[in-house]
Each structure stands twice: as structure tokens, then as C-alpha cells.
Amino acid sequence: MIKVFYDGKCGLCRREIGHYQKIAAPDDFHWVDITEDKDNLAQAGLTFDVALRRMHAQDQQGTLYKGVDAFILVWRHLPRWKYLAPFIALPVIKQIADFAYNHFADWRIDRLHAARCDLPVATERQDS
């Protein structure tokens, strides 16, 4: 079972994960809302701050993926999306996807910090 760590307080994140949950096979994923489940974060070796900055997923062997690599892992196990995963994984396409996702994720976290003073302040701008 693949563990997917996501920000359940982010409307965009919730909608995207909700879509994945609807189309995923019931036993393929364990969806972990990082705002509600700190135990699974600790077991994966993640801090809340790090998990908040990028989506993370952990495969059955315990390997942790973040950002675009996490999306590729998830998409490989979803109907229709499994066809996008190998394309995004192509070297040049992946570099572009990493660049775009990292900039979007940094913008999102900056916006979150501005809106919510209860969030921890990250020590690094980008953990890519």
C-alpha cells in the first residue's frame, strides 16, 4: 500500500486527493492528512514543516518520494493517470515539471504563511 501525505487544510490539495481517492482501488493507497495524523509523519521520518512544503508518498518498500516523484508514484497506480506518469518521468519533461511544481509549492507555502500564523516557518526556501 502506498502512503500519500497531503495537506488536508489546503482546498486545492483536498480536491486533488479527493479525485484520486474516488478513482483509486480501495487497497492501493493509505491517504494521510498531515494536519490530522502526526504519527504517520513521524514513522516516515518527516516533520510537519517538510511535509507541508511538498507532497510526499511512500511506497511498499518504505522508499519516500517527494514533489513530482511522489505524483509519478501515485499516478502509476491510478486509472487514466498511469498513462501520464511515464511521460512526466521523461528526463527533460521531468525537469520542467520539477521546476514548475517547486515554484508553485513555494508560492503556496508563502501564501499559507501569510494567511495562517500558526504554521511553522521553514528554514529553507525550497527542499527540492
Image (cartoon, rainbow, N blue to C red):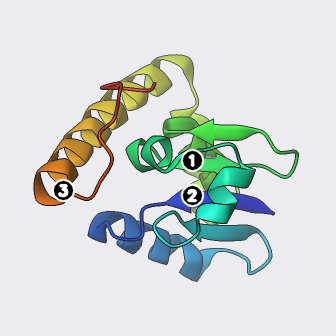
The numbered dot on residue 114 is none
Q: Residue at x 57, y 77 (%)?
A: 21
The numbered dot on residue 56 is 1
Q: State left or right for residue 103 relative to residue 58.
A: left
Amino acid type of the residue tagged 1 in the rendering: His
Q: State left or right for residue 100 relative to residue 27.
A: left
Secondary structure, mark 3, is loop
In this view, the residue in front, 16 or 36, is 36
The numbered dot on residue 5 is 2
In this view, the residue in front, 42 or 98, is 42
Q: Position of residue 85 (x, y in %)?
A: 59, 44
Quadrant (top left/top right/bottom left/bottom right) for the N terminus: bottom right
Which residue carries the number 3 mark? 117
Mark 3 / mark 1, whichever is N-terminal: 1
Q: Residue at x 57, y 47 (%)?
A: 56
Secondary structure, mark 2, is strand
Q: Residue at x 26, y 59 (%)?
A: 118
